[in-house]
Image: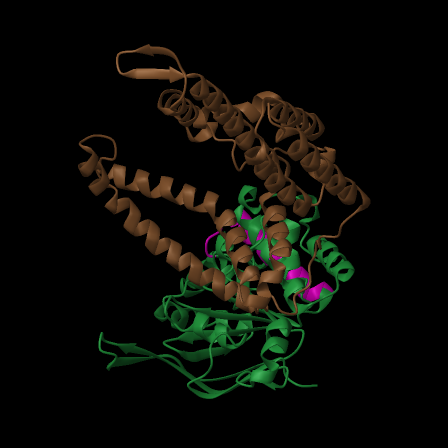
Chain colours: A brown, B green
Amino acid sequence: MLKDITLGQYYRTESPLHRLDPRVKIVATFAFIISLFLVKNFIGYLIAGLFLLICIRLSNVPVRFIFRGMKAIFFLLILTMVFNLFLTPGIVVFSFWKLQITKEGIKLALMMGIRLVFLITGSSLMTLTTTPNNLTDGLEKLLGPLKKIRVPVHEISMMMSIALRFIPILMEETDKIMKAQMARCADFESGSVINRAKNLIPLLVPLFISAFRRANDLAMAMEARCYRGGDGRTKMKPLIYQKRDFIAYLCILLYVVMVVVIGRLPV
Amino acid sequence: MSKMIQTDKLVFEYIRRDEEGNVEGITRAVDEVDLSVEPGQFIAILGHNGSGKSTLAKHFNALLYPTEGEVHVDGMLTEDEEHLWDIRQEAGMIFQNPDNQIIGQVVEEDVGFGPENMGVPTEEIWERVDESLRAVRMDKYRKASPNHLSGGQKQRVSIAGVIAMHPKCIIMDEPTAMLDPNGRREVIRAARGLNQVEGITIILITHYMEEVVDADKVFVMDRGRVVMEGTPRGIFKRVDELKALRLGVPQVTLLAHELRQAGLPIPDPILTRKELIDALKKLRAEGYML
């Protein structure tokens, strides 16, 4: 199950999309998501779909890899579609027992389905083509103006990248503790849900203690290396817009205008 | 030329408090330590667990401040707010657990972390990262994730991260305690190289006697005090005293010591395997039945 989630995973390859500034990709993803909610007809979705397809092509990420992530949300997708299908009032097309399918329902269900699929594909395309580090850097730069109203932007992005760095370490540790407790006859797999949750305590307590110890050590190591917050810090890999980034911004702008104008025409 | 590190009657006390915040007890972790380190030296501080050697080391980087007494790093008083960042830049620190001191998700980014904090311009950061990765021979792994490296390699990355800050002195707080023998050798070799090639002062804190053989000077600590001080040769002569401090001498030294007690006239002390072999050969030439 965990292996299937491609959301938030990075796919290492060379492509024009990989080379783009993370800020462009973040803005583009948001623009794309918003555009999906502004579209009112199927032609609009067609344009959005085409745009997405071009992006996938440009990203060099295998299509099968992108859609593997879809499995995780398949259930959610079906549920949303079914609810929309049966619970939208309007002209009844088909009915059995207490359930009615309306013309509006079919349309809405289809639209919701397409919207969800596009939304997930679009955002996973961003994470597939951007390293987590780049992503946090991009967010830090984009949200930079918020510093003026005392939002700790640098600290948040630092916390995010440290969290990302420690995920594999803590996973390994969980595995180790689990095995150590299993060797002492702890049972994580049988019993009722409540019992199983209770059995997790001998796993969580040592994990938390060790996480705090690590945090303490890391804080000390950071201080020893002159870390003193974001002020006066320089960047080893500063984000600087290139020509291609401006071209990308232009493409996104064109797409948004097109989709909003065409997609909102009454059918 | 001022001393790299100098402590005057340094005392540090941990104060234990109960839940209401009343003082329950005071533990003296460092007790009136006077020591001085000359620039360019390779110093080793030996001691059993709980002897106060790590607490002492944290004073050299202004991570802890003395309860009594003073610490000077390159002539700067550590309690002086104004010099705090200069001290941390000049006296780099390596810790025990390699995982808990690597911040970056890519090796080169971690090495760049220190210079970034110091506000070094971007181009110079890259130069510094290149040269420091080369100095510890980790340049092949610059794009790798730290999670895929061995313990010894991770520790060398940490050392590179400190070198990139251009320190005059590196304090290593048991850098080999969590490593296998191979990793231990890698780290010690890197430390020695930096000392000899770059002239960086190294203060190595350890409880492995084998690692201090080449040091210029050794301090042995017990219960917060410096109980022995001298060259490795001078220290290793006192095998029985070291044993009383629960510190094992290197195997060869111990073997030579036992042989000497059994009546063989072997010179004192023996630090390396080669010395012992030479001594034994000489004895055989002199007509001992070996």
- Look at the picture and state if A218 lies above or below A71: below
Instruction: Judge whether residue B178 is colored magenta.
Output: yes
In x, y percent, where is residue A166? 48, 49
Start-end of magenta stretch: B177-197
- Can the viewer see residue B249 in this picture? no
Q: Magenta region, mostly helix, strand or loop? A: helix
In x, y percent, where is residue B10? 46, 85
Residue beneath the point at 67% across and 49% down: B138
Residue at the right extreme of this rendering: A243
- Look at the picture and state if B232 lies above or below A206: below
Image quarter hosting the C terminus of chain A: top right
Residue beneath the point at 46% across and 78% down: B228
Front residue (pair B24, B6): B24
In x, y percent, where is residue B282? 59, 58
Instruction: Judge whether residue B249 is colored magenta.
Output: no
Where is residue A86, by image quadrant?
top left
In the image, taking residue A11 as reference, residue A207 lies left or right, namely left
- Can the viewer see residue A46 in this picture? yes
Residue beneath the point at 45% across and 61% down: A217
Front residue (pair A231, B171): A231
Image quarter hosting the N terminus of chain A: top left
Front residue (pair B254, B135): B135
In the image, taking residue B52 as reference, residue A257 lies left or right, namely right
Residue beneath the point at 57% across and 33% down: A36
In x, y percent, where is residue A196? 22, 36
In the image, taking residue B241 as reference, residue A226 lies left or right, namely right
